[in-house]
Image: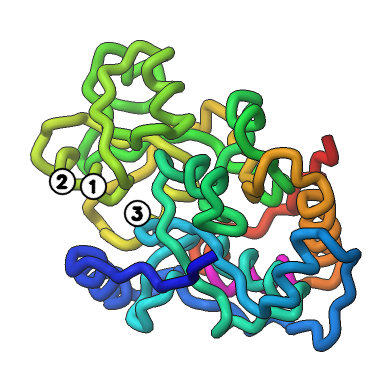
Amino acid sequence: MKRSRIALVAAAAASALLFAGCAGDGGGGGAEPTVEETPEFEEGTTMAALAEAGEITIGTKFDQPLFGLVGPSGDPEGFDVEIGKIIAGKLGIAEDKIEWTETVSANREPFIENGQVDLVVATYTINDERKQVVSFAGPYYMAGQSILVLADNEDIASEDDLVGQPVCSVTGSTPAANLKELGAEVLETDTYSNCLEPLRNGQVVAVSTDNVILAGLAAQNEGEFKVVGEPFTEEPYGIGVKLDDTDFRMWINDVLEESYEDGTYEEAWNTTAGTILPFVEPPAVDRY
């Protein structure tokens, strides 16, 4: 696999500087995970191939505060990024040997299928439809769909208030599908950060996606937006790998469970998303 760093467009860099300038950005890096010195894997497995190569390509979001946001260093920072580093470390791969590839909601499955990435950690909801195309380790976090509105909006308090209303979400995402089923008029874009200007100018009345993503956007634009209502779905975040790569999926599940027990998961949370959101115990992994 050719491993070249994806060049960042000027807009992404500008966004990163804006976010980095906010107090308590919640998107910073955690402590560097332990890197195994001589990991051993069964020959022919994905783990063995990656460990021998000494490098890995991980897909993640570049524009989501708390989970995956490009920082001043030019690399993404956040909870998903730290989870990726934990997995890489167990393969004996150091942080500087990780290539981060931007994956938006619409290209996560194609990137996995085509081998453009080795795995995806990108606020990636596990569902039955996606499991026909890729496999999932985890879940490692349970989010829920919620609603972001302007700070002075008093008209929207729950998902019922979105019926028949223009709402922004992301193409290829579970939240966009949920909104259509709900009866909202969905304006779709490629990233959630691109939903903010339509919300500012009144083109839509709300942005809707997972509560943790909205919390990050609200925190990075203090006083401009607010999250309203209770989450109205369950969104189990998983780690995407190639379909039927059962050995890799099960091994990642082992890594996740070990991180729950040894404290590295909680440390990763506390140094990233945990600067804004409270810690909750991770869900049990699904070894389907």
Q: Position of residue 239 (x, y in %)?
A: 65, 50
Q: Position of residue 189 (x, y in %)?
A: 26, 38
Marks 3/2: CA–CA distance: 12 Å
Is residue 154 visible in this depiction of the protein?
A: no
Q: In front of the other: label 3 or label 1?
A: 1
> How far apart, in angstroms, are the residues tagged by discs 3 and 1?
11 Å
CB of mark 2 within 8 Å of CB of mark 1?
Answer: yes
Residue drawn at 74 percent across, 52 percent down: 282
Which tag, 3 or 2, sits closer to the chain's start? 2
What range of the chain is rendered magenta? 264-272
Q: CA distance from mark 2 to mark 1?
A: 6 Å
Give the labeled residue for mark 2.
197
| Residue 263 visible, this orientation | yes
Q: Tell me residue 263's x, y (percent).
A: 79, 71
Label 1: how many residues lie within 10 Å, few (<14), some (14-19) or many (20+)? Answer: some
Q: Secondary structure at mark 1?
A: helix
What residue appears at the point 35 percent right and 11 percent down from the top-left corner?
Answer: 183
Reply above or below: 216 against 237: below
Disc 1 target residue: 194
Looking at the rendered structure, the kind of residue marked 1 is: Asn
Element type at mark 2: helix
Q: Nearer the viewer, mark 2 or mark 1?
A: 1
Q: Earlier in the sequence, mark 3 or mark 1?
A: 1
| Quadrant of the image containing the C terminus | top right
